[in-house]
Amino acid sequence: MSGPERITLAMTGASGAQYGLRLLDCLVREDREVHFLVSKAAQLVMATETDVLLPAKPQAMQAFLTEYTGAADGQIRVYGKEDWMSPVASGSGAPAAMVVVPCSTGTLSAIATGACNNLIERAADVTLKERRQLILVPREAPFSTIHLENMLKLSQMGAVILPAAPGFYHQPQSIDDLVDFVVARILNLLNIPQDMLPRWGEHHYGVDD
C-alpha cells in the first residue's frame, strides 16, 4: 500500500464541502483509516451546498458517514471538537498525514499562530510539530495580505498550501470533474492511487507519434 494508512481529514467553514466529501469517499475506497473532524460552520456550509445533513453527535455522525461512504466498521472515526483524548490530539497517536479541506481563512490563521482552541487546530499543530504531512486547501477570493502572510508562514513550517483552484486542461464536463481535479491533486500529494486525473504527460503524444 502506497501512502499513509491513517489520515486525519478535517472540514472547516469555507465553501467547498464537495471537496471534503469526495476526498473522504476516495480514502475509503483506498482502504485508508480516516480520523474525521468537522467544525459547526462546516456543517452549515455542507447543508447549504449539498444534500448531506450530518448528525450533530460524533457517534451518530460516524454511523452516518460509514453508511454514506460504504466504509467498513471502524474505518471512519469521528471526534468532537473538544475530544482531547482522541489519537489526533497527540504526536504518539496521530496519523502520518492531515488534510484540511476546505480550510477557512480563520482556521488557516489559527493553525499559523498555534491557537489550538479546538481539536482541528490541535490536530494540525501536532502534525506540524511532529514534522508530518499537512495539506491545507483554502477557498477564498481574493486573498488579503493577512491570508497570504499566514500561507507563507505555514509553507515555511512545512505545510502544503493547495488552493481549491481547479485547472481546465483536462476539459471538465461537469462540476464533479472540477471537484475531482482538486481531490486528485490531494491524493497525488498523499501518494495514494487515483484514477480521476492523469498525471501531466501520461497521455502526451508527440507530433511524430
Image (spheres, rainbow, N blue to C red):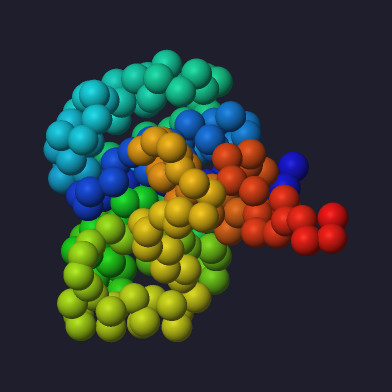
Name the residue at 58% across, 40% down. Answer: 196
Q: Is residue 201 above or below residue 194?
A: below
Q: Is residue 95 visible?
A: no
Q: How many marks?
A: 0
Q: Is residue 182 visible?
A: yes
Name the residue at 31% across, 61% down. Answer: 138
Question: Residue 126 at x, y = what percent?
Answer: 43, 64
Front residue of 78/153: it is 153
**Relative to 14, is 131 on the left or the right?**
right
**Relative to 60, is 194 on the left or the right?**
right
Name the residue at 54% across, 71% down. Answer: 131
Question: Residue 134 at x, y = what percent?
Answer: 47, 63
Would you identify the image quadrant in which residue 32 lies?
A: top right
Indicate the quadrant containing the C terminus: top left, top right, bottom left or bottom right.
Answer: bottom right
Indicate the quadrant containing the N terminus: top left, top right, bottom left or bottom right.
Answer: top right
Question: Residue 149 at x, y = what percent?
Answer: 28, 83
Q: Is residue 48 above or below residue 172?
A: above
Front residue of 162/98: it is 162
Name the residue at 20% across, 83% down. Answer: 145
